[in-house]
Amino acid sequence: MTVSVTLQPQEAMAALVTREGRRDPHPLYDALRAHGGLVPVRPGLMVAAGYAECSRALREPGLLVQDARSHDTLHPDWRSHSSLRGFTNSVLYTNPPDHSRMRRLMSGAFTPRTVAGLERTIARMADRLLDRMAELGTGGTPVDFMAEFAYRLPVAVIGTMLGVPDDDHIWFRAAVEHVTVALEGSSRASGLAAADRAMDELTAYFTGLIDQRRRRPADDLISALVQTHDRDGERFTEDELIGNLVLLLAAGFDTTTHLLGHGLHLAFEHPGAAARLREDPEFAAGYVEETLRIAPPVHATSRFAGTDVDLLGTRVPAGTKVLVLLAAGNRDPRRFPEPHSFDPSRPDIQPLSFGAGAHFCLGAPLARAEARIALPRLFGRFPGLAPAGAPTHRDRLVVPGHDRLPVTIGRPDARSPVRPAACAVREAPRSAAHRPPGHVSACPAK
Ligand code: HEM
């Protein structure tokens, strides 16, 4: 996209919400940042496009996430949408004291220590999926990396943590694809009907599972959260329980799927980095951080000013919405020399991709571990991995990414012989409280 450097903030914002703008937003982010790190767009709307401004906005206690109170002002009909109601019961859309209460209850499941304990399981799941890719890709048949690996690994990991049956993993993909439209901001009202249906489906599904775990607890996150709720219901309401389970499921794989997709795509563009990933597992941590910086799965979030706020010397009047462009902050030349170049050996990357402050991503250690473990295994197993045709892209502003990323696997590495695939995709009977018709079952990556 060719963008004039003199583009006014309103023009850049208008271009950003077009299909072309969503497909290639970086020139528009640059144009916005050229007006300063914190840019007034119109009365009631400012955009944080610099690294320091994004970071500060997310840590500023006077800037709140959109919650029931702000929805009442900004989108008076929000309660008629079950998707907005559902997420508004979760940590993502609550402020203190509710946020701090819920976050404490959930955070134990995602500490670096807990995640370190999952690393062998993640590696085993990744290897099973690579077995499956090897089988599907025999004889040079193209394999869709997004469907066969990038989606399946994170859904298997979060599914196992939550304790949802393997056979349900595949229909989650469509349900989450629809429900996450509600996280894009309610401007795209057309998508909200499908988001509402998906939220209703997921709510019925988790209500059934909660009921099962109440009767027969298991060693999983749903049982742990149900027990916390039942012990002290005042600390965790039933609606909050369901809202947070849907959030964990959606946040648990929608984003990580695209991190894996971007990680592969960048490796195709930088074959030297791919070779290093194969040969030097230590290289993976920097590679993942730089992938997160240059191609963050989540491009933006927002806050609104509960009171007048001073943000790095600029006044943000009470009631103003601040759009925090994480993807723009990650390419701020004041913070990163040559910000548009992919350089995994950059020192001190610290991308904004998981947010910052009170709402810093709960799953960051998990997502990082999944990518750090999976990408070297992928390139180690398939040294001849290559693109097979053009990828297709998701038309989203907040969580863009690849819909399909077809690859050929080449000759698998002789040192890690192809094992038989773990299972075949097949139609499966309904296993849990609720499942829509016509789905196919997941290949258990376990
Ligand atoms: C690469 C993958 C991921 C990215 C880029 C990502 C990004 C983000 C961002 C930017 C936020 C902050 C939003 C805000 O401040 O408004 C966030 C919050 C959150 N993320 Fe992630 N996320 C990822 C993976 C995960 C995973 C794997 C999980 C759970 C299993 C998860 C669970 C959450 C939760 C629960 C919150 C809300 C925290 C709060 O509001 O206190 N995320 N994530």
Image (cartoon, helix red, strand yellow):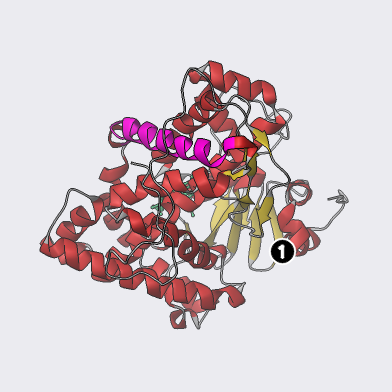
Q: Is mark 1 within 8 Å of ligand 1?
A: no
Residue 175 within the magenta-colored segment of the rendering? no
Residue designated by label 1: 17
Q: How many discs mark residues in the rendered view?
A: 1
Q: Nearer the viewer, residue 423 or 147?
A: 423
Residue drawn at (46%, 76%) of the image: 197
Q: Which residue occupies 47% across, 76% down?
A: 196
User: Residue 206: where, in percent of width, then height?
Assistant: 29, 66
State the image coordinates of residue 29 (x, y, percent, origin top left): 73, 49
Q: Residue at x 38, y 41 (%)?
A: 422
Residue 407: image location, x then y, percent: 64, 40
**Horizontal arrangement in the rendering, residue 196 relative to residue 401 (left or right):** left
Q: If the image is split into quadrants, where does the C terminus sit?
A: top left
Location of residue 171 by image quarter? bottom left
Vertical arrangement, residue 286 with respect to residue 161, above or below: above
Question: Which portion, as a residue range, is magenta?
Answer: 115-138
Circle 1 — which element?
loop
Instruction: Specify the amino acid type for callout 1.
Output: Val
Task: List x then y, in percent, for residue 432.
Answer: 27, 65
